[in-house]
Image (cartoon, helix red, strand yellow):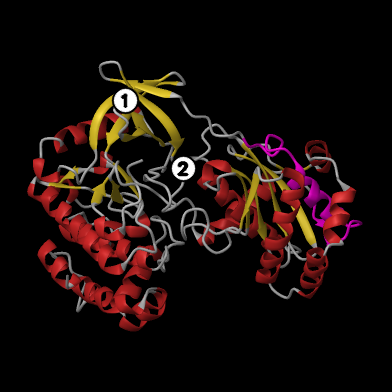
């Protein structure tokens, strides 16, 4: 997709929940048939254990949603372990979600390893589910996770998930199409083997992945391209975790695979969302290959391949990159940002802009012979070239590409791209990385009129910038971030920041 949208805004979560509630059938028997049988002995063993008794006391004393989340962190792993051993993993995603700070949900169960492609089921905790508003917000958040996972679990159509409160639990059967969804009524819940809600919760966690709608990711074994060349696929890249060695680039219906070529070098196979976008990216990569100044800093097209599972062509790309880790040494991060500024400058010399310099496209280069290189050896690698555009076209009003979280203010306002807005995007990437994935406007969509005003309000006010940005980043980085803020927003919003001015404020 040219415009990479965050699917829902905070204000639309409840509206989506209301729509789902209105269009879903209450069908308790449907869930009775699908969930695993109840293991009374296993449930009693847990509740009578030291941890079980402790969590019962904490649940009874809970006075806020966070107390329930803390209890879930104890309850769910124990039940999963007794039912599935090590094959099923619980992930507390209430604080960070599966993609940095873009999405939060309280309980995620995955087929190991923990990444979006392996999510089996999940739950959202609310302190109370009595009111229709509470129920709508809870199921709206569940649907938001469906929206996120739809691009990571390409063949999956259904999710059997749950909402839970101190006194109730409710199960949902959600379909990607939003048609014929089902739910249970609110079922009374307490940590007791006589509680119908606890018995259903235990059965839900004990159910097979298939009964919960999950299909394990399928990988093509090989991708053929060029003159009888092969890429052996080793993984599907589905997570924005810094532990992975490539960008996800999973916006829309994109699929990305990591693998090895016949010479044992690492490569990425990318299937863009549509054939038109694939052709567009292929053409852009062909242009870039003629610019030697960018060699090694931008991905290169090795060939166009095919797999047995799809007739669509796939781009084979090198070199391989990985997301910049949040824990990176600060001077190394600033050096890396400087390298990306130089890439922006080189592209502009050729008459082009990238158009989407988001955190997920500005990567750390991974050398094939040094997978564990330290921060000081980091090199910049720019990926996702389908948004590459001529400067003349980019400057046109009403022309917008990019990821809303990182867009420059003028791009959000549809007043055109320029080198300065590209650099402004890199400033937001720097803040995002230093803060561990926190930006004050992360909950707002490109179509939300508040996105522009919130971003402008935070960046133009020194006090707001300190309260909503600097408090989340290390103190030693406050000066450089404030200098960059002033470069773009003091005394007024500036759209003529040059690469030289930006680099000067890094004080490297």
Residue at figure coordinates x 29%, y 42% from the top left: 369
Which residue lies under the disc numbered 2? 238
Q: CA distance from mark 2 to mark 1?
A: 24 Å
Tell me if residue 191 is in the magenta stretch: yes
Secondary structure of residue under mark 2: loop
User: Where residue 451 sits: x, y (%)?
Assistant: 38, 63
Residue 271 in view: no
> In the rendered structure, which segment of residues is drawn in magenta?
185-214
* Image quadrant in which you'd find residue 377: bottom left
Q: Is residue 134 magenta?
A: no
Residue 311 at x, y percent in the picture:
40, 19
Q: Earlier in the sequence, mark 2 or mark 1?
A: 2
- Which residue is at 31% across, 71% downward? 456
Is any atom of residue 501 visible in this view?
yes
Check the image and name the residue furthest to the left: 349
Q: Are marks 2 and 1 in contact (CB under 8 Å)?
A: no
Q: Residue furthest front?
A: 369
- 227 relative to 208 in the view: left or right: left
Residue 497: percent from left, percent from top: 14, 66
Rendered image: mark on residue 449: none
Location of mark 1 (residue): 262
Establish if 420 lies above or below 286: below
């Amino acid at each position: 997709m040219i415009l990479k949208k965050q699917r829902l805004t905070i204000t639309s979560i409840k509206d989506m929940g209301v729509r789902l509630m209105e269009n879903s059938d209450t069908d308790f028997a449907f869930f009775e048939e699908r969930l695993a049988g109840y293991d009374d002995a296993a449930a009693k063993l847990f509740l009578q254990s030291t941890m079980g008794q402790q969590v019962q006391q904490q649940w009874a004393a809970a006075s806020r949603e966070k107390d329930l989340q803390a209890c879930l962190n104890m309850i769910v792993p124990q039940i999963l372990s007794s039912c599935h051993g090590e094959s099923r993993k619980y992930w507390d995603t209430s604080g960070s979600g599966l993609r940095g700070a873009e999405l939060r949900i309280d309980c995620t169960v995955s087929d190991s390893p923990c990444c979006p492609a392996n999510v089996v089921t999940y739950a959202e905790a609310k302190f109370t589910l009595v009111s229709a508003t509470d129920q709508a917000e809870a199921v709206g958040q569940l649907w938001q996770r469906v929206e996120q996972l739809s691009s990571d679990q390409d063949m999956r159509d259904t999710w059997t998930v749950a909402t839970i409160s101190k006194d109730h639990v409710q199960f949902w059967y959600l379909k990607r199409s939003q048609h014929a969804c089902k739910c249970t009524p609110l079922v009374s819940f307490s940590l007791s083997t006589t509680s119908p809600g606890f018995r259903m919760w235990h059965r839900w966690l004990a159910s097979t992945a298939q009964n919960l709608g999950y299909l394990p990711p399928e990988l093509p074994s090989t991708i053929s391209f060029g003159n009888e060349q092969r890429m052996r696929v080793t993984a599907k890249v589905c997570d924005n975790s810094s532990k992975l060695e490539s960008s996800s680039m999973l916006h829309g219906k994109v699929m990305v695979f990591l693998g090895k070529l016949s010479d044992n070098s690492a490569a990425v196979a990318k299937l863009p969302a549509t054939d038109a976008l694939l052709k567009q990216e292929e053409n852009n990569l062909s242009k870039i290959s003629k610019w030697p100044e960018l060699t090694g800093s931008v991905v290169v097209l090795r060939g166009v391949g095919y797999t047995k599972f799809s007739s669509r062509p796939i781009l084979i790309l090198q070199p391989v990159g990985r997301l910049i880790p949040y824990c990176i040494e600060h001077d190394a991060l600033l050096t890396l940002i400087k390298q990306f500024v130089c890439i922006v400058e080189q592209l502009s010399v050729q008459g082009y802009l990238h158009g989407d310099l988001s955190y997920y496209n500005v990567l750390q280069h991974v050398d094939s012979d040094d997978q564990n290189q330290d921060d000081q050896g980091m090199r910049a690698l720019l990926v996702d070239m389908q948004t590459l555009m001529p400067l003349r076209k980019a400057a046109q009003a009403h022309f917008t590409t990019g990821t809303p979280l990182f867009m420059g203010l003028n791009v959000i306002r549809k007043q055109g791209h320029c080198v300065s807005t590209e650099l402004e995007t890199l400033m937001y990437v720097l803040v995002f990385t230093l803060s561990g994935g926190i930006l004050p406007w992360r909950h707002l969509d490109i179509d939300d009129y508040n996105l522009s005003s919130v971003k402008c309000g935070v960046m133009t006010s020194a006090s707001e910038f300190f309260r909503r940005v600097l408090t989340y980043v290390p103190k030693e980085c406050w000066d450089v971030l404030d200098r960059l803020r002033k470069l773009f927003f003091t005394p007024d919003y500036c759209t003529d920041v040059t690469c030289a001015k930006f680099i000067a404020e890094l004080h490297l």
